[in-house]
Amino acid sequence: MIQRGANRIEVVQPSATLRVSTMAKELAREGRDVVDMSVGEPDFPTPDFIIEAAYRAMKEGKVFYTPTRGVPELTEAIAEKLRKENGIDVTPDNIIVTPGAKYAIFEAMMCLLQEGDEVLLLDPSWVSYEACILMAGARPIWVPHEEGFEDAPIEDYVTGNTKLIVVNTPSNPLGVVYPREFLKKVRDVAVDNDLLVMSDEIYEKIIFEGSHHSLAAMDGMLERTITVNGFSKTYSMTGWRLGYAAAPEWIVKLMNRMQSHSVSHPTSFVQYAGVAALKGSQDFIEDVVREFKARRDMIMEKLDELGIKYAPPKGAFYIFMDVARDSMEFCEEFLKKEYVALTPGAAFGVAYRSWVRLSYATSRERIAEFLKRLERFLK
Ligand SMILES: Cc1ncc(COP(=O)(O)O)c(C=O)c1O
């Protein structure tokens, strides 16, 4: 029987996180008290006013096909948000709404990259960038961070084949909020070499220290930046699948073409929930950020006490830490002995094999339990 898929998917490796998460699920099924520090989604419910808006839209009969790029109410609300909050000078013609930010990333890469193209990726980076680059037929070029994780020598990795630089601030898995100087360097390298930039800003609201800067707002960047964002993290809407890209019109047109022949558009009533999310009160975000910060502080205190090195977690809800041994082995052993699930660093790049990512999108009680088990395991 024929059992070979197309090269474009055969080149993508199954996620390195899969082994650990499968083991964790099995242990939980056996009745073990597993502390899962590996999930990448907020543990808060979607705010009620957003749920009400989706329900209202359904009742009003907004249950049919929408324009491929999204309903005008939503593309207008997104353009307004980007102009006001991010200083990105866009109109609704620069916006395409997608089923999750992940699909915006996939779609943009499929539309812009091909064989021979190189993409600069900061090591470590979120898992799906590399997969999308490979599926598009291009080559990821890993750029190591400098000590402290707030700078990287991207200028040294540009070749005649470089087409795109990917930046994610605040970063998953690092939790780093890149300082303005680094983003300015990205800008200079992109402009000097006529490159495109993908700026994934999905964690922009979850920041404890430092401030968020949008690359597309910098001089000369509007015409070369694809800004990616979405509703999953800020509004606890991971399962709703709603994200977007803001880009020069020629890129939005290509993405629109691909979207019209693939997913068509995100679910109609989910788009109206998105309008409500952007236009409603944003006050709850402050409480969410305060809670994430308290959890982060709790973990940092213990890691400092245990002498564990980590990247400066100034945003998002992850800590990337050095366990000073093979991280896959560490994760498997920690899971088997203490029933704690973490994500091995190998999932996020090439250089950080002794590092692991923990997500603190879980209650303080579970975090306290994790810290107790970590201390016991290390002793
Ligand atoms: C950096 C980053 N970008 C994009 C996404 C995708 O988010 P969405 O749920 O909108 O597809 C995630 C989700 O984990 C992420 O961590």
Image (cartoon, grey):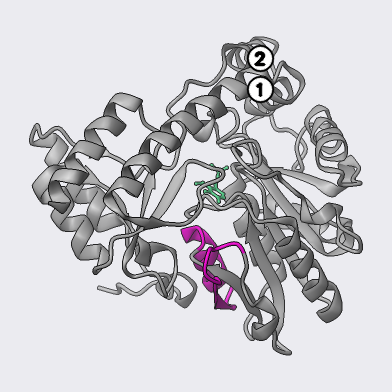
Determine if the C-beta at disc 1 is less than 8 A from ligand 1: no
Marks 1 and 2, the one that precedes in the sequence: 2
Q: Residue at x 36, y 62 (%)?
A: 345
Q: Is residue 121 left or right of residue 224?
A: left
Question: What's the residue type where badge 2 is placed?
Answer: Ala
Mark 1 and mark 2: span between their CA atoms? 5 Å
Helix, strand or loop under label 1: helix
Near mark 2 (Cα within 10 A), the count class, few <14, some 14-19 or many ≥20, is: many
Q: Nearer the viewer, residue 132 or 306?
A: 306
Helix, strand or loop under label 2: helix
| Screen quadrant of the N terminus | bottom left
- Is 85 magenta? The answer is no
Q: Nearer the viewer, residue 249 or 39?
A: 39
Residue where numbered disc 1 is placed: 273
| Magenta-highlighted residues | 125-150
How far across and down, in percent of the image, does residue 137 sit? 57, 77
| Quadrant assignment, res 264 | top right
Q: Residue at x 83, y 64 (%)?
A: 224
How far across and down, in percent of the image, does residue 46 sit? 53, 21
Residue farthest along the bottom direction in this orientation = 160
| Quadrant assignment, res 98 | top right
Question: What's the residue type where badge 1 is placed?
Answer: Ala
Q: Residue at x 67, y 40 (%)?
A: 265
| Quadrant assignment, res 310 | bottom left
Residue where numbered disc 2 is placed: 53
Q: Residue at x 84, y 32 (%)?
A: 72
Q: Nearer the viewer, residue 114 or 353?
A: 353
Q: How many marks?
A: 2
- Is 137 magenta? The answer is yes
How far across and down, in percent of the image, does residue 328 sit? 24, 64
Mark 1 touches mark 2? (CB < 8 Å): yes
Q: Is residue 215 left or right of residue 324?
A: right
